[in-house]
Image (tube, rainbow, N blue to C red):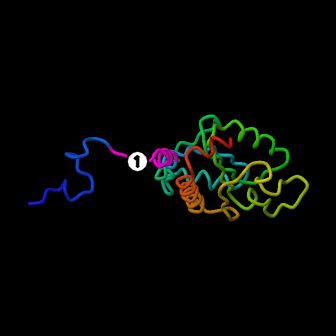
Amino acid sequence: MVSANTDLGYNSKIEGGVIVSRADAAINWIRTNSMWPMPMGLACCAIELMAVGGARFDIARFGAEVMRFSPRQSDCMIVAGTVTYKMAPQVRRIYDQMAAPKWVIAMGACASSGGMYRSYATLQGVDRIIPVDVYVSGCPPRPEALLDALMKLQDKVRREPATSRLMSA
């Protein structure tokens, strides 16, 4: 008779209560499953960002339900909407106040490229003042698109060395 323990690759009678893993894998697993967003809702895309927190789309499935309005408590800035030149220094200041490692999602056409606004007052993409990790297209993008961007960011975090962002920050 074969017991259920011997069918698994892990036998608690032999290995004891010890599980071995790489530090990078453990740290990145923690980072991907507890990504706390800093919402930067600057225009109409912010409504779609708010919808993601509701029960219908449930961003909590990805460990990102804790929207922090303090940059010191967040590690993923979601820039949703049009960034004007007047608002750009404040966006940069909030990004600089975030602790490392930190990531950025540019949500919508306006945050990604200035959108339909080709004027003297509109910044033509938030990537001119802060580094962007994932772009979400659309005007405004659907909440599902933001969830897809969050999953792409989690994949990116899972693949990178755990200390790479600390050294470059």
* Magenta portion: prevailing SS class: helix
Query: Outermost residue, left direction?
Result: 1
Q: Quadrant of residue 92?
A: top right
Q: Residue at x 67, y 60 (%)?
A: 135
Counting every numbered tag in the picture gives 1
Is the residue 142 above or below the residue 63 in the image? below
Give the x, y percent position of residue 12: 23, 46
Viewer-closest of 88 and 82: 88
Give the x, y percent position of residue 127: 76, 54
Query: Magenta segment, which residues?
Result: 19-31
Q: Does residue 124 appear left or right of residue 56 in this picture?
A: right
Q: Secondary structure at mark 1?
A: loop
Viewer-closest of 156 and 97: 156
**Which residue in the structure is indicated by mark 1?**
21
**Magenta stretch contains residue 26:** yes
Q: Residues within 10 Å of mark 1 (few under 14, many from 20)?
A: few
Q: Quadrant of the N terminus?
A: bottom left
Q: Quadrant of residue 151?
A: bottom right
